Amino acid sequence: MKLAILKSFYVALLLCLFTACEKEIDNLNLETFDLSMKKNQSVGTFEFPDAEVFDISATADGSIMVGLNTGNGRSIQLIKNGEIRTLHEVETNTNIQGIQAIGTGNAFFTTGGSNLAEDGELYRISNGKVRMVADLGEFEKANDPDAFEGIQWKYQLCEEEGVFSAGPQNNPFKVTTLDGGTALIGDAAGNTILQATTTGHIDWKAILTPPLDENGEFMVLFEHDGLTCYVQPVATSVAVGPDGYVYAGELTGAVPQTSLTPEGLPKGLSRVWRFPADATNLVCSELEGSENCYLFLDGLTSIIDLEFGPDGLLYVVEFDENSWAGLSNPSGGTVSAYNLEGELIKKAEGLMLPSAITFDKKGNLWLLENNIFAPTVRILDPGEFTHEGS
């Protein structure tokens, strides 16, 4: 499977790229959203037809922020008191991807990257305004950490398969906070966890590295003009735990057909990494990584979100058990909860392309499903979980 297939999905999971950009927008119009986007009263599901949604986040008052992308534009929606309302209309070059509420009316959100890292930004919502605070695309163009920092495992020439150009590539995906002025971002195309502040300072916290093959070496995707091009880890998600560690999840890019991956699908190759929240410039690798970056979980498939629940468990969202590359024959996705020793506590299976989760102030787990087909947001019933050992 060539890199073009990989990038067509993991550069924001099939997001569409648009034009026009405005760095600051004054708009706090809490009008009720289009009635075509409504609550299904019978099942408590909020529907967003003809849209793409990549993330949701609970606010302090229990409302749910939704990053909405439609043919008519992009906006931050708010699910509150049984209604969907428009919180902010925003104008950006690319789709809203990750969103993380800070308090009730404030938040960080990211926008997607495009070829040669021409886009991809971190925005801050505060005091009724939306402003771009960190240019993540410019950081990638100037640094390209997985190619030029650490063990330098990725070659830029490997990017020119298909529609992409040889050079830096970025795709800021999910985002979380260290504090109100500092965000952590999973850069899917950059294979890195970034740290950015509201003053515009950006650094790389950690570089993720390729999964291993049958021989315990980095898995090779293909050879390119004498260069070895590896399977990419694809950093999608990041969460800060109650233990003071950062947890990073990976989707895993396209893979070759081998005895380890006989169907040519990236199944069972996704991992979760753990490193101290105050650490920086780490390499997360099973071969020659930093001593402060630890492998926390492995054997998972297409991780697309991580969140810590009020119970202290790490909830891991897997897009589909057949992987993102096997959606012609989907098997259903999962939300699994692990304790800090890495033990599986409970799992909800057979979900329809679960894409993001968040916990409200009452401890309810809200679930985004079908993120690019017909997005829905609902509370996941506790009864949908199967407890280990029960």
Image (cartoon, rainbow, N blue to C red):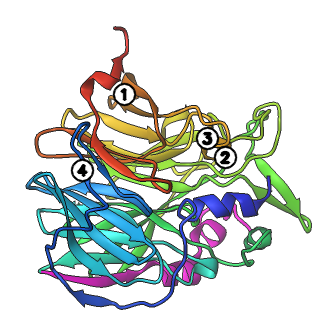
Write the start and end of the magenta stretch as one range: 128-155
Q: Residue at x 69, y 78 (%)?
A: 167
Q: CB of mark 3 within 8 Å of CB of mark 1?
A: no
Observer-side mark, 4 or 3, equals 4
Spot occupied by residue 300 in the image (x, y as percentages of width and height)? 55, 34
Q: Which residue is drawn at 74% across and 47% down?
A: 255
Residue position marked by numbered label 3 in the rendering = 323
- Cα separation, mark 3 vs mark 1, equals 25 Å
Give, as a three-letter code, the residue at label 4.
Answer: Lys
- Cα separation, mark 4 vs mark 3, equals 30 Å
Residue position marked by numbered label 2 in the rendering = 325
Residue position marked by numbered label 1 in the rendering = 341
Observer-side mark, 2 or 1, equals 2
The crowding category of the residue bearing disc 4, from other C-alpha atoms within 10 Å (few below 14, some 14 to 19, many at least 20), is many
Give, as a three-letter code, the residue at label 2.
Answer: Ala
Residue position marked by numbered label 4 in the rendering = 39
Observer-side mark, 4 or 1, equals 4
- Mark 4 or mark 2, which is nearer the start of the sequence? 4
Q: In this view, does 68 lie to the left or right of 125?
A: right
- Cα separation, mark 2 vs mark 1, equals 30 Å
- Cα separation, mark 2 vs mark 4, equals 31 Å
| Helix, strand or loop for disc 1 | loop
Q: CB of mark 2 within 8 Å of CB of mark 4?
A: no
- Picture layout, residue 115 above or below residue 319: below
Spot occupied by residue 55 in the image (x, y as percentages of width and height)? 36, 57
- Mark 1 or mark 4, which is nearer the start of the sequence? 4
- Mark 1 or mark 3, which is nearer the start of the sequence? 3
Q: In which quarter of the image is the C terminus?
A: top left
